[in-house]
Each structure stands twice: as C-alpha cells, then as structure tokens.
Image (cartoon, coloured by chain):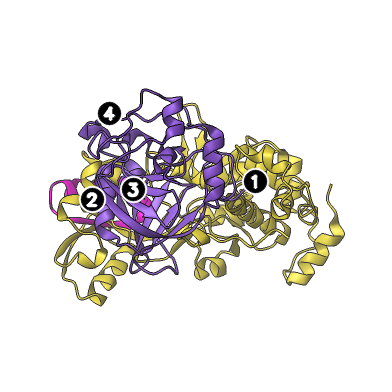
Amino acid sequence: MLKMIPLLALAAAVGFGGGAEAQTTLKAVQDRGALICGVNQGLEGFAIRDDKGQWSGFDVDFCRALAAVIFNDPSKVQYVPLSNSERFDALKNKQIDVLSRNSTWTMGREGDYAVVFAGTTYYDGQAFLVPKSRNVQSALELDGSKVCVQPGTTTEPNFTDFFETNHMKYETVHEAGVPEMIAAYQAGQCNVMTTDESGLFAMRLQLAKPGDSMILPDVISKEPLGPVVRQDDVQWFNIVKWVNFAMINAEELGVSSKTIDDALKSEKPSVKRLVGTEGDFGKPLGLTQDWAARAIRAVGNYAEVFDRNVGANSKLGIPRGLNELWDNGGIQYAPPIR
Amino acid sequence: MKVRASLLLRVAFGAVLAIVAGAGAGAQTPGQDESNVVDQPGYQPTPEEEQLTGAFEKQEVFFRTSEAPGTVVIDTRSRFLYLVQPDNRALRYGIGVGRDGFQWSGLQKISRKQEWPDWRPPPEMIERQPYLPRFMAGGPGNPLGARAMYLGATVYRIHGTNQPQTIGTAVSSGCFRLVNEDVIDLYGRVAVGTKVIIKQAVAL
C-alpha cells in the first residue's frame, strides 16, 4: 500500500520534479511481481550466469537484496544483461528498474543520461599487477617498468600521469584485449599490467601461476561503482540508496544473516531501528517495517556479500581495502538509520 | 598470579573466567565456537602446514587510520593483525583469536618480548590434564611458538603457535597467535612500548 501524501511532501522538500507521476517505480515493480535489474553480461565476481541460468555475483546480490526488501523474496528478479554502451539507455528507456552493473559514478554520466547514482557499493580504482619476483611493495618502486595496458581507455593516461608525476621511467606495451595482455605479460614482454583493481584480480586467476604475481595496494584513480536509477523518482532513488546503506550499517552493527534472529531480540537502539523493532523507517519509502531485516536475512550484510563474491571467500580474493568500513581502515560509510 | 599459560590452553571454565574478569575483559559476542581444538604440546608442524595462503598470508594492504605508523591494530572479527605503515598502508598478518567467552578489547602496550618462550601449565590445568608436562622449554613443539610479546600487565600475549591450522579461527583463551614465521617477522618490527589496539566485533 502506497501512501502518496508523504511521498509528495518528500519529493517537494528535496526539490526533485515529477513527484506527481501516476505510476511510481515501486508500484510498477510491485504490480509486475518482479524487479528488473540491469547487470553485466558476464564479469567474474560481479555478475555471472551459470549453466542453469542462475545469476550470482556482487552486483546480482544487490538486485536480490532489493527484491527481498520489496517482496521478501530475493528470487523475484528479472536480469537483463547489458553491454557498456547499452546500459544507460536501457535505464532511461525504462527497460530496467535499476542498473547494478559495475558502473563508475561520474558527474558527466549524471548530466548526460538523466540518471542518478544511488551511492557507492564498491570503491574500485586503477592498480598494478607485478611478478612477485620483482620484490616491490609499492607502486612508487616501479621505475623502469614495461607496462601492459589497453589503449583507448582512461587507464593509459592515468598510469602515464602517475609515472611522470613520480619521476619514474616506463615503456608502454599496448595490448588490444585482456587475453593479449595476459599473453604478453606471461611471455615477459611487460613486467607490469594495469587496469582497475577488480579486473586485475580476475586476470590474475587466468595466469598459469597466479601465486607468482601480486597486486600492489596502491590505487591511482577513483572508480566508485554503484547502482543507478532514473532521476524522476525520488522515492525509488531513496529505496535503492537505503538498501545499500542498510547493508553497510548492518555490518557495522554486527547484524548478519547468521545473527539476524538475535538482532531481532536486541535491546540496542541502533540495532532495533535497523531491523525494525523500533520506529518505522520503511514506511515513508513505501516499505515494510522489517525492510532491512528482509535483505539481511536473504542476502547478508555488506561484508557477507563482499566476501562471498569478490573477497576472502571467493575465487578472486580481493582484499577489502578501500571497501573496509570507515572505522576499520576503509572508506565505506553509511549515514545512520534514525 | 602466574597463570599465563592457562590462557593458551583449555582449563576449567571458572578459573579462566576469573582471569578474564581480572584483566578487564570486554563484552562477549556470538561467534564460531571452535573450542574443540586442543593444544598439542610437542607437535611440530611441517613447512607446508606453516605456509599460509590467501587472505591470511602476510601482505601489505591499504589501511587508513589516524594511528601512527608502528602501531599494532588487532581486528579480532576478521582475524587480522595490522602493523600500521606510512602512507595509508599496513602489514597485515592472519591470526587466531579468543574463542567465545575469551574475547576482550582495549588499548595496551607491549611490555616485554621473549624469544622461544617456555611453557608452564598452571596447577588447575595439570589437575584437569595430568598428562601435560609441568614445564616445556621453548622450542619448535611449544604451543607458544617462536616468539611472545606480552600485552601490558594482562595475561594475554601475541605469540607463535605449533598449530598453524588454527590461524583464522577463534580457539584461544584470549591470546593472539600467528604462525612462527609471521611472529618472528612482527617481533623484529615492534619494540617494547609499542601501542596495541584490540578491537572486538560489536555486541548486538
């Protein structure tokens, strides 16, 4: 059941237009009985479809969490695999309700495509993969490197700027695609590969001896990845945004899929507000009181989703790094639920 | 009260709870109960067993903190010990931590360092497990491992282990254990007086 009055008040207060639209995204999703989520066509750790047609991954789990919040059932999602060039048009043309597809939040994209990023689920950034035998600990020790890079991306100017700024010599080895880059690296034609950190971890898995190479902890560019929605529905924007925040807050408060039943009995005010045993924070968004508890039970908190898909418990083994919570060495920080 | 070794071993619950209380231990949180893992004095792990892989292998990681380089931060929830480095970095080591009921948090300083520490099981432990040695000289089969760093005036330490398979688990009585290669490495990098922050998962 949708309460229109607070919605309109909220939309007006925030200053977004179009609050009086007849059909909200939430209503459309509820009437349809499923969320339509735009995802990657296939990216290890983020969105992968198995031989039975089941989707899994970090971005997929975000779709599942949203479905759990709305339907109390994480399986009520229709996945639409989208290419780089299709993704924003698919959102703009209402083919999908939300885009959860390793997309970098930039100002240009919000301006050009009439879309809005609903926060950052994953802080990615350009990094360097090197043979362990080089015995380097820092990207500042890469003087004299031969660097394999894909031309025509922002990756190349990012790395050349970094080397030049830090007075390091380099030789660029252009390789058209990932397989070519890996082949050149393994043949010793270059002794550094550079692209986004998540991509390097996936590439390392494809090396003959993954354990002989390491990814340096330095990140030299900002690639904040997050879910994207249309600009014309502030209620939906808030739902998507707060599902992400709820999962991050859950980790911070120690609420996980394993502890959710204990959390429902907790006397701690911050936990009670999160799981809905105190207050009714879901209502203004058109959600139930237990909206966040539904997502946590079905999909887990932020740490569970990270570890399972891309982190310590996954093939990729990406360290939390920037994606650690703000009070534990990283920058993941969610506003409080109160 | 010289009961240090009791913290590393399974002892009568009441006795340990008294010690924990005496040391000002923090809140308990639900977690994995792996307390069925017992110490194995005399066991000497193979080099393969001592080789950690994946996340628990020693590595340099991104780590933002307002703590000065050289500070040790122990995150018991994720089973990592961080030695803070300059420029948003830390050396990260995999650790084993206190099991349910033996978890604590706080701020301490390294008060003493010991190479190849001896082991003296306390009387209450001998009573429960009469077959244990009364004294075990430091060495490769010693449950305390290659190095020990004492935490303030508490009965807890950062130490090595002869059971590398317990890294990443919660089996100890409040101490923090590293594989011997890692504890030797850490020992060489920290001095007496080093600040140690022990963080516990929040309670629900």
Tell me the crowding category of disc 1: few under 14, some 14 to 19, or many 20 or more residues within 10 angstroms, Cα based.
Answer: many
- What range of the chain is rendered magenta? A176-203
Q: What residue type is labelled 4?
A: Tyr
Tell me the crowding category of disc 3: few under 14, some 14 to 19, or many 20 or more residues within 10 angstroms, Cα based.
Answer: many
Q: Chain A is drawn in which colour?
A: yellow
Mark 1–mark 2 CB contact (< 8 Å):
no
Tag 3 subunit: A
Q: What residue type is labelled 2?
A: Met
Residue drawn where x is 52% and y is 44% of the image:
B19
The number of numbered discs placed on residues in the rendered structure image is: 4
Report if residue A41 is visible in the image: no
Residue A134 relative to residue A242: left or right: left
Res B43 label: 4
Res A66 label: 1
Q: Return the residue nearer the eye: A60 or A153.
A: A60
Q: Which amino acid does label 3 sit on?
A: Phe
Mark toward the viewer: 1 or 2: 1
Residue A320 lies, in percent from the top left, at: 43, 52
Q: Which amino acid does label 1 sit on?
A: Leu
